[in-house]
Amino acid sequence: AAATVEQQLLTYFKNDIESVQPVIEHGNDDTIKNQRMIKELDRSKAYSLNDNFTYKRPYGFVLKGIAYTNITTWKAVYLKVLHALYKESPAAFSELVTDKRFISKRGNPLFTKDLKKLRVAQSLPAGFYTEVNMSANSIKDTLLQILAYFSIDEKEMKIYLREDRDA
């Protein structure tokens, strides 16, 4: 129900989407800003996608040497990775919707053009939708599959977590 309300709010505020969603800061190749952001992230431990993220909250990540910070949810990590991969390779990204690797054993697609096939859909710049109703570890597993699809070594992505207040 919460995801449905969130989707309705995002639809209602579509013209003013930046005020509803947090601004994700990301660096660029060979810039001072990117180096500063990576140093800021390196103050804490970097985690690989092979770790368990149950009860963990993201702060940012580095993908192929580019840092992304101010990310507060796993959904935001997932969507930002997808957007970065789309910018890098739009043709290969468009083929995600037809690739059999992204269809579950029960026949549920991860990427589709039909909204009714997804529980909570999020539109992507390639003109189709992805499922975003996933746990942190489901997102991690999906990211591993997507990186493999794009022939990106999993070591090219590091996750940084926010300070755990319960630790």
Image (cartoon, helix red, strand yellow):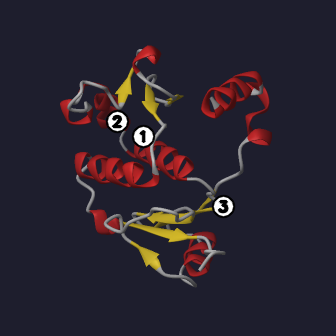
Identify whether 39 is placed above or below 54.
below
Q: Secondary structure at mark 2?
A: helix
How far across and down, in percent of the image, does residue 82 sit? 44, 43
What residue is rendered at 30% in x and 54% in y?
144
Amino acid type, residue under disc 1 in the picture = Tyr
Asked if the residue under mark 3 is in contact with the one under mark 2, i.e. CB atoms within 8 Å, the reply is no
What residue is rendered at 28% in x and 29% in y?
95
What residue is rendered at 68% in x and 32% in y?
6
Residue 53 marker: none
Q: Is residue 119 visible?
A: yes
Q: Is residue 67 visible?
A: no
Amino acid type, residue under disc 3 in the picture = Asn
Q: Quadrant of the N terminus?
A: top right
Q: Viewed as shown, does residue 114 lie left or right of 15?
A: left
Q: Secondary structure at mark 3?
A: loop
Q: Which residue is mark 2?
A: 93
What is the number of callouts on the image?
A: 3
Q: Residue 152 lies in what quarter of the image?
A: bottom left
Amino acid type, residue under disc 2 in the picture = Phe
How far across and down, in percent of the image, does residue 89 sit? 35, 41
Closer-to-camera residue (85/157): 157
Task: Say whether disc 1 or disc 3 marks the residue closer to the N-terminus.
Answer: 3
Marks 1 and 3 sit apart, C-alpha to C-alpha, by 21 Å
How far across and down, in percent of the image, does residue 114 sit? 41, 15
Question: Label 1 neighbourhood size at 10 Å, few (<14), some (14-19), many (20+)?
Answer: some
How far across and down, in percent of the image, does residue 159 sit? 46, 67
Q: Which residue is mark 3?
A: 70
Task: Say whether disc 2 or disc 3 marks the residue closer to the N-terminus.
Answer: 3
Asked if the residue under mark 1 is in contact with the one under mark 2, i.e. CB atoms within 8 Å, the reply is yes
Marks 2 and 1 sit apart, C-alpha to C-alpha, by 6 Å
Q: Viewed as shown, does residue 123 lie left or right of 72?
A: left
